[in-house]
Image (cartoon, grey):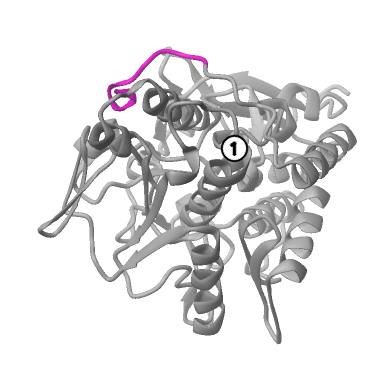
């Protein structure tokens, strides 16, 4: 396909939004440049499984070049965008290179938000990337090894205390899985310490976990967490985090492994667009997801602030996919001289897994919990993995883990960080 003279569409970000936008333009008479800081697309809903040694990286990630190998109008560039020049329709990258665009789709996602306490990041890593997952996996597995080597019971207890800050889906998933690892996976593998004696604490500043779900499902999730052995603390914000643990007001909890799942902030790239932002730093977009005053720029995914029926469109994978598809359609319509339709998010429901055979699901009129919700969650996540191989491998690994309680990816690699002790 000869595309040199076709309009140039630059897509920033190869996550759900960016990838679905690129796919949506597969047959359009455009040339696409997809820019990302990493060379892979990541299935983020299962990232916690890599962090807790249940899955390996290739199970939930695939090279962007491989995914788009048959799409002749798409070029993948490994780079990072540092600024957007709207006036001259160019994007600047950190290596000094620039790309001119006719249409721009900004899908650069979100990052961790520590609510003014960025110094906590050193001691409480968040979970957004594969690098984050490997850091968390190393800290968790190293904590059990340090507990085995420790002779003082008080110091050993600090190594066996695991604190997860944030009671949203990621926090609930991490806490539940950590409890299972301690009580089942590592049983009979240590001689001097007892992994089953580990304390897993889930700390949520709000009144309940999974606050986006109905109260009855939130309550069921709490009970399922407690049955797994997780201590749920709600209504108390964390006031300090350091290498020795956390503080909840005047209460001090000794823990060398603290994980952050309390919040996200939009990509800082949104600020370079010089348009109104919401409190989370997301770009306030028009009904068709375009930038006010710049219809050739569309902002999607976690970076977009879009209201629908008086509520914000949630920053979840299905919304990002739908936005990506809509952005591609909008560009096609503009190329035909048509006015793009308004974006409408179709909410199919919310899911959260808690542990083995434990989950909750809000499907509108239907609400599920326990084993039924877990099987539904498993089916949906395997279904939406990219590629037959990924689906097959994940299904095999999960089946093995279900029957044996084993987690095959328990390998400690990488450089030690401050929080590793």
Residue corresponding to mark 1: 187
Q: How crowded is mark 1: few (under 14 residues within 10 Å), some or many (20 or more)?
A: few
Left or right, 402 with reference to 182: right
Q: Quadrant of the N terminus?
A: top right
Which is more toward the observer, 377 or 38? 377
Specify the quadrant of the image occupied by residue 62: top right
- What is the span of residues highlighted in magenta in the rendered image? 413-421
What residue is rendered at 13% in x and 59% in y? Answer: 249
Left or right, 228 with reference to 159: right
**Residue 96 in picture, x, y percent from top left:** 41, 13
Question: Is residue 163 at all visible to an observer of this figure?
Answer: yes
What residue is rendered at 85% in x and 22% in y? Answer: 2
What residue is rendered at 29% in x and 60% in y? Answer: 279
**Residue 153 in picture, x, y percent from top left:** 28, 34
Dominant SS in magenta: loop
Q: Does the magenta segment cover residue 341?
A: no
**Residue 416 in picture, x, y percent from top left:** 37, 16
Question: Is residue 8 at all visible to an observer of this figure?
Answer: no
């Amino acid at each position: 396909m000869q595309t040199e003279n076709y309009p140039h569409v630059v897509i920033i970000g190869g996550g759900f939004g960016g990838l679905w936008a690129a796919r949506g333009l597969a047959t359009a008479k455009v040339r696409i440049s997809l820019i990302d800081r990493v060379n892979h697309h990541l299935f983020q809903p299962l990232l916690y499984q890599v962090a807790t040694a249940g899955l390996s990286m290739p199970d939930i990630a695939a090279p962007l070049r491989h995914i788009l190998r048959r799409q002749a109008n798409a070029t993948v560039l490994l780079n990072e965008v540092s600024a957007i020049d709207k006036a001259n329709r160019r994007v600047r990258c950190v290596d000094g290179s620039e790309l001119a665009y006719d249409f721009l789709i900004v899908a650069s996602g979100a990052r961790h938000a520590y609510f003014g306490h960025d110094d906590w990041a050193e001691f409480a890593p968040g979970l957004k990337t594969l690098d984050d997952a490997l850091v968390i996996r190393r800290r968790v597995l190293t904590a059990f090894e340090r507990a085995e080597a420790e002779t003082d019971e008080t110091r050993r207890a600090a190594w066996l205390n695991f604190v997860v800050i944030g009671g949203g889906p990621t926090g609930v998933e991490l806490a539940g899985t950590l409890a299972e690892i301690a009580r089942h996976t590592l049983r009979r593998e240590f001689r001097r310490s007892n992994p089953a004696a580990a304390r897993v604490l889930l700390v949520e500043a709000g009144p309940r976990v999974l606050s986006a779900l109905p109260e009855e499902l939130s309550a069921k999730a709490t009970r399922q967490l407690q049955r797994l052995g997780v201590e749920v603390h709600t209504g108390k914000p964390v006031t300090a985090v350091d290498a020795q643990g956390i503080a909840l007001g005047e209460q001090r909890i000794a823990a060398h492994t603290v994980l952050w799942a309390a919040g996200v902030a939009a990509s800082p790239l949104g600020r370079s667009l010089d348009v109104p932002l919401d409190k989370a730093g997301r770009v306030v977009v028009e009904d068709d997801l375009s930038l006010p005053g710049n219809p050739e720029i569309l902002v999607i995914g976690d970076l977009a602030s879009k209201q629908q029926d008086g509520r914000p469109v949630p920053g979840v994978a299905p919304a990002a996919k739908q936005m990506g598809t809509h952005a591609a359609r909008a560009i096609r319509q503009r190329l035909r001289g048509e006015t793009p339709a308004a974006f409408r998010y179709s909410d199919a429901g919310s899911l959260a897994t808690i542990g083995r055979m434990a989950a909750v699901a809000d499907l509108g009129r239907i609400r599920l919990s326990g084993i039924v919700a877990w099987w539904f969650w498993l089916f949906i996540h395997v279904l939406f993995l990219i590629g037959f191989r990924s689906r097959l491998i994940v299904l095999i690994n999960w089946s093995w883990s279900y029957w044996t309680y084993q987690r095959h990816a328990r390998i400690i690699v990488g450089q030690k960080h401050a929080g590793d002790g």
